[in-house]
Image: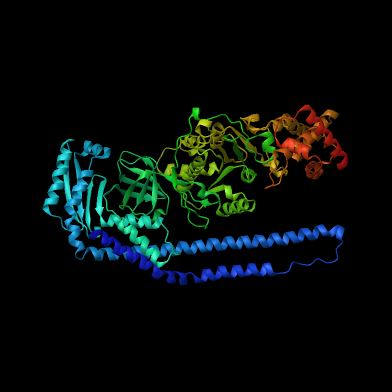
């Protein structure tokens, strides 16, 4: 009972510190609060301001302009309000976060100070000393030799044992430990060397270390565990004094001290985000470790005499010779619906300033891909809303389609448009930014928010300013987040932007870990790295829930060289590629898809029957056009049939152009492609195709709603429906002329 009263005492001190420090915290951040209030006042001024008056206009000619100006003014006001509210939300979060960190640091210092004073006084000191024999009995029940200890004994014969306490131990306890460990090691033909240490920093209790394994029953370890829980559970400032006291009292009453078992190692060297350690003989690849300073890392290299790991945080805080602790689990990331609409880092921590994320489930960042029998063939289309993609290189749910091209050719634009087009379709989207500028990531987030696509999207950001370790694990963490939804029967679209920078980050880590470089200085296992990442995307069978994860990896080429090492690797892993041509981009083609080098190995299985019908000859016509246009540019004369093919190709090419952030439904795409391929736009000047397209959609929506509803079903058109559609197109052509 006495130990419980001790815990209650210092928890009450915590409550007092929290309550007393609220006013201090508020005064510290008053300037930032005033700044937020000023921004809200600016909103009120904008709302109260009068809309500009427009004079001397003709109602028929300038009414539309007035309406557009009024709408533009309203949109600007709304955008300003939204930006300021977002800023205020982030500022409030930062204030709360800094207040929690400050209060938490003060609380921890107060705890340590008071606990040391309490356990150095009676009756707590005597009570704790009396419990030492009971503690050592409980510890010895848990002691066992690990595989690492047995391996060490084969080479050294002697295993070191250290018994530590805050006060001098009795000979009876020392002899008991010595007798037990000697007998245990004799059974495996080993010897023991017992060291007894007196360490006042332990405050109270006992700690027994055998080899790398520590059996800890000290007050210091309880404080360490309590500190970790305090950092996970955020201080509820909104609660009243009585509620806080009741909460801490309840925790104290239910507190039960126990033995904590963990393994320790030692830092040998640390540099450039890489740490070499010894000890931790039982650790596994991919396991998380924690340093004395609180930073964490992940094991990436295991050798016979040392262990290499990457550091997630600031490696400058880690010193050679410091202790490193084994956490006891492989690297995981939080998953769940709570992540939707958020921007998180490589380990799942929020970085968007919108508050903390609390999830009930975590998944390992490395996970085996679904087995062949657990998969189904790709048969359901995933519409991107881009005419050139859905018609020429269709993407199906569960497919892996590579987007490849030089920088600044619109690769990310295709990915973002695909995300925007998933609105209302029940598809969860995950965008992984690897090595991108923070400004670019912020711009993409704002774009998704503007088009109401952020609510079903998770952004995993490992910016260019981050370490190579964070860039390395980012796509694996994002895939784990996507797998949570996939294995729960949902459809997921994941975009890796881009794997070229991911390969560079992995090469950097591998060479720092002294792995031999392979072709083009890349480690030889870079292919296996990307293959085990992309193989996790699949279409699951009905038995497995029927979910899917569609992957759109992005690769940046140099001067259009798709035969380089990394591009050829990913091309051989994926189910097709969308190649963006630099020349087409410079010509104004958006998206700049090269039909000859782009392919979807799923083909028509990823299209609706309607789209498959209207785009059957589209690729052939475009390929013929590209060949003929190169031929006639030298002034060669052509016959009428060739000239017609060229004119149709020009209009097809113009019709496939599409502005950013304006995805089209499948029915509109099919209608336009049918109109152009059947020659209904032959008399339309090429520069007027965009007007032709807009008027076509408007006409059919207003005059032929029944036909549009038929197209919306996506079924193959019957001969009667096709004739009816052609008749309507003929009427539209006359009207357009």
Residue 639 is at least partly visible in this image: no
Residue 46 is at least partly visible in this image: yes
How many marks can you see? 0
In the rendering, at what x and y percent does residue 314 appear? 42, 54
In the rendering, at what x and y percent does residue 295 appear? 39, 53
* Left-right relation of 228 to 55: left
* Left-right relation of 613 to 558: right
Q: Nearer the viewer, residue 597 or 427?
A: 427
Up the image or down, 323 lies above or below 43; here it is above
* Left-right relation of 489 to 517: right
- Screen quadrant of the N terminus: bottom left
- Screen quadrant of the C terminus: top right
Structure colour scheme = rainbow
In the rendering, at what x and y percent does residue 35 appear? 56, 69
Q: Nearer the viewer, residue 238 or 49?
A: 238
In the rendering, at what x and y percent does residue 59 appear? 86, 60
* Left-right relation of 541 to 702: left
Q: At 26% across and 57% down in the image, what residue appears?
A: 219
């Amino acid at each position: 009972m006495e130990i419980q009263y001790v815990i209650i005492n210092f928890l009450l001190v915590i409550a007092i510190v929290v309550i007393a420090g609220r006013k201090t915290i508020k005064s510290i951040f008053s300037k930032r609060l005033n700044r937020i209030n000023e921004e809200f006042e600016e909103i009120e001024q904008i709302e109260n301001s009068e809309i500009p008056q427009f004079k001397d206009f003709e109602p028929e000619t300038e009414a539309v302009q007035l309406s557009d100006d009024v709408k533009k003014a309203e949109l600007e006001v709304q955008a300003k309000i939204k930006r300021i509210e977002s800023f205020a939300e982030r500022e409030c979060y930062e204030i709360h976060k800094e207040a929690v960190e400050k209060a938490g640091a003060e609380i921890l210092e107060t705890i340590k100070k008071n606990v040391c004073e309490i356990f150095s006084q009676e009756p707590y000191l005597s009570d704790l000393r009396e419990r030492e024999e009971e503690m050592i009995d409980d510890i010895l029940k848990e002691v066992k030799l690990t595989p690492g200890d047995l391996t060490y004994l084969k080479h050294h014969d002697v295993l070191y044992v250290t018994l530590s306490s805050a006060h001098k131990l009795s000979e009876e306890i020392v002899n008991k430990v010595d007798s037990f460990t000697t007998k245990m090691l004799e059974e495996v033909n080993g010897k023991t060397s017992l060291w007894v240490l007196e360490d006042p920093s332990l405050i109270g209790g006992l700690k027994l270390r055998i080899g790398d394994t520590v059996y800890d029953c000290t007050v210091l370890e309880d404080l360490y565990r309590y500190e970790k829980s305090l950092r996970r559970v955020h201080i509820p400032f909104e609660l009243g004094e009585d509620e806080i006291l009741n909460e801490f009292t309840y925790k104290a009453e239910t507190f039960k001290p126990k033995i904590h078992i963990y393994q320790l190692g030692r830092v040998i060297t640390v540099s450039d985000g890489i740490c070499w350690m010894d000890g931790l003989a039982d650790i596994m690849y991919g396991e998380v470790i924690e340093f004395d300073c609180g930073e964490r890392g992940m094991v990436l290299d295991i050798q016979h005499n040392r262990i290499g790991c990457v550091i997630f945080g600031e490696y400058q805080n880690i010193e050679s010779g410091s202790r490193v602790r084994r956490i006891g689990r492989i690297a995981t990331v939080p998953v769940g619906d709570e992540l939707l609409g958020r921007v998180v880092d490589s380990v799942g921590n929020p970085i968007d300033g919108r508050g903390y994320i609390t999830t009930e489930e975590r998944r390992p960042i490395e996970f085996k891909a679904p087995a062949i029998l657990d998969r189904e063939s790709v048969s359901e289309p995933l519409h991107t809303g881009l005419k050139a993609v859905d018609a020429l290189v269709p993407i199906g749910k569960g497919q892996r389609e590579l987007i490849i091209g030089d920088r600044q050719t619109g690769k990310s634009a295709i990915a973002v448009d695909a995300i925007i087009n998933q609105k209302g379709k029940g598809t969860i989207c995950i965008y992984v930014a690897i090595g991108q500028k923070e400004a670019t990531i912020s711009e993409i987030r704002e774009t998704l928010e503007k088009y109401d696509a952020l609510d079903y999207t998770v952004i995993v950001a490992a910016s260019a300013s981050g370490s190579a370790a964070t860039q390395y694990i980012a796509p694996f963490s994002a895939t784990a987040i996507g797998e949570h939804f996939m294995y729960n029967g949902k459809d997921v679209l994941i975009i890796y932007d881009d794997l070229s920078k991911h390969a560079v980050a992995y090469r950097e880590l591998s060479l720092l870990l002294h792995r031999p470089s392979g072709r083009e200085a890349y480690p030889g296992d870079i292919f296996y790295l990307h293959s085990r990442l992309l193989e996790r995307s699949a279409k699951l069978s009905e038995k497995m829930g029927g979910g899917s994860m569609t992957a759109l990896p992005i690769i940046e080429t140099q001067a259009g060289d798709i035969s380089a090492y990394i591009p050829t690797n990913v091309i051989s892993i994926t189910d097709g590629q969308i190649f963006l041509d630099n020349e087409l981009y410079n010509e104004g083609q958006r998206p700049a898809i090269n039909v000859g080098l782009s392919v979807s190995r799923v083909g028509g299985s990823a299209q609706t029957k309607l789209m498959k019908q209207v785009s059957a000859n589209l690729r052939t016509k475009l390929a013929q056009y590209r060949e003929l246009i190169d031929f006639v540019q030298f002034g060669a004369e052509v016959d009428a049939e060739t000239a017609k093919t060229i004119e149709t190709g020009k209009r097809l090419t113009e019709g496939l152009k599409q502005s950013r952030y304006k995805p089209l439904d499948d029915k509109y795409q099919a209608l336009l492609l049918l109109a152009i391929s059947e020659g209904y736009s032959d008399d339309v000047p090429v520069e007027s195709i965009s007007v032709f397209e807009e008027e076509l959609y408007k006409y059919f929506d207003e005059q032929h709603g029944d036909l549009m509803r038929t197209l919306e079903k996506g079924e193959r058109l019957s001969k009667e429906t096709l004739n009816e559609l052609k008749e309507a197109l003929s009427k539209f052509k006359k009207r357009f002329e």
